[in-house]
Image: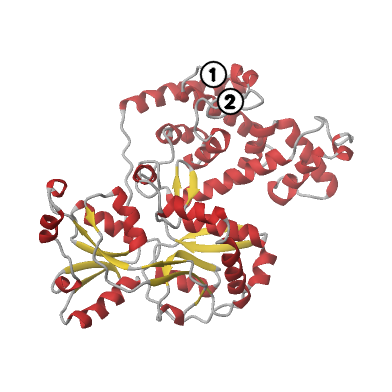
Amino acid sequence: MRKNEKTYRLRKSWLILLLIICACQHDVVVQEKPLMRPADLTEIQPIQLDLKAIKERGKLIALTLNSSTSYFVYRGQAMGFEYELLNRFARHLGVELEIKIIPDVNAMFDLLNKGEGDVIACNLAVTKNRMQYAAFSEPYNFTRQVLVQRRPEGWQKMTPREINKEIITSPLELIDRKVYVNKSSAFFSRLENLQNEIGGDIDIVPVPGYIDTEKLIKKVANGDIEYTVADDNIAKLNATYYPNLDISVQLSFPQQIAWATRSNSPALLSAINSWFEEDRKKSVHAYIYNKYFKASKEQWAQFNGEYSSLRGNRISDYDEILKEYCKIIDWDWRLLAAQMYQESKFDVDAISWAGAFGLMQFMPATAAQYGIDQASPPEEQIRAAILYISWLDDYWKDRIFEPEERIKFILASYNVGLGHVLDAMNIAVSLGYDPQVWENNVAECILLKSNVEYYQSDLVKYGYCRGEEPYTYVKKIFDQFDHYKRVIS
């Protein structure tokens, strides 16, 4: 009776929410605010933590930026040149990768030396000043600093000579011009030195560290500011998205791009250098490089679209619906988005080998209980998933008391069924594990359900299951959820 009453209340809530969704437009606002106080580089004695300790910990912590080359989320998937290299390097070490998005580059050096990160990887230029605070790997890329400016109105109908009359074509013309750069960047010191070289003052406007280069490039393209400076690889990528930009004026000699580690972590630095030397010989390394630095304009227009953390702050077509429905089960909507990504990659027409279908991959028998089939629209599929998750929550509420732990048991049950999870809890009790904790406890025991000595034992009522599936299912959803929390408001 309790289940029927709750189902009725949820169905009624769904109708109300559907009316709200149909009647309203939801704007997504991205606020440019710091995650921490902008910092200047400070001398911090680096913590003693090298490669051996990182391997024992089982995790490499990378400090990076939410940018078009370092790390971003596109249609639910974590991407970025640095991110893909870091993933490959972590696998090479045999450890997991943890990403920390730090908006201020200078703050990264402080966090690195405090031990809150192991490597800085964010298209980082090697400078003499930065070498005082960290050790740098061998360069894996080279770049130059270029002036980013806007072409004149109507430039599409002008000849190159006519355009050049309206814009800066030489560093000498920067005298008395206002140029906005991040004070924590190498661009600030370069402009200071350039003043001596050209024999005149540049009006260098420092901006806070959390306003990164790509935000400044966007401001130039939109006409909010006149000039900024960027590395040419970043400038080229953004120029594919903002065709009104001119990036032809070079302001520096070639600079080295590398990863940074603590100065007292020689083993980690050596491992990075050895890995880079081997990895750059492989075709996959060239493929990754070309994907991000030689992508087509159409591809970068997609990457910079509304479903990218670089511009749009959206995950999928279903964000607004997820936000409304998640209020019913009191989940962060990004967690349900992570589950939907794991189930279907947001493909409403997805069908698995076992016959599960749709955004949330319902099996036909379960789907029928909630009044949906393959022809049901996305809203009804999501509604059915909420009803099912709510039912699972009711079941586990009296058994798993800690809310986040309960979510893990709900997800595992969604994936493999209640019975198999209950079996794993029985195994956990028999082996001295905590039956109310998923990770390192019940999760380890569900793996044993593919082992004959367990699935045929008296502890198990529901027989064999491929325990690896729910084990990795829960882990991947929470990993994906972590990605979303870093970059999606």
Residue under the point 55% across and 17% down: 373
Given residues 94 and 327, the one toward you in this image is 94
Q: Provide the secondary structure element on which disc 1 rests.
A: loop
Vertical comparison of 341 with 57: above or below: above
Q: Position of residue 346 (x, y in %)?
A: 49, 33
Residue 21: image quadrant is: top left
Please report contact status of discs 1 and 2: CB closer than 8 Å, yes or no: yes
Q: CA distance from mark 1 to mark 2?
A: 9 Å
Which residue is denoted by mark 1 in the rendering?
374
Which residue is denoted by mark 2 in the rendering?
351
Asked which colour scheme the image uses, the reply is: secondary structure
Amino acid at dot 1: Gln
Circle nearer the viewer, 1 or 2: 2
- Report if residue 405 is visible in the image: no
The residue carrying pointer 1 sits among few (fewer than 14), some (14 to 19) or many (20 or more) residues within 10 Å by Cα, namely some
Amino acid at dot 2: Ile
Q: Is residue 80 left or right of residue 354?
A: left
Tell me the quarter of the image containing the N terminus.
top right
Q: Provide the secondary structure element on which disc 2 rests.
A: loop
Question: How many numbered marks are there?
Answer: 2
Vertical comparison of 200 with 166: above or below: below
Q: Position of residue 276 (x, y in %)?
A: 56, 65
Residue under the point 62% across and 70% down: 271
Q: Position of residue 278 (x, y in %)?
A: 60, 64
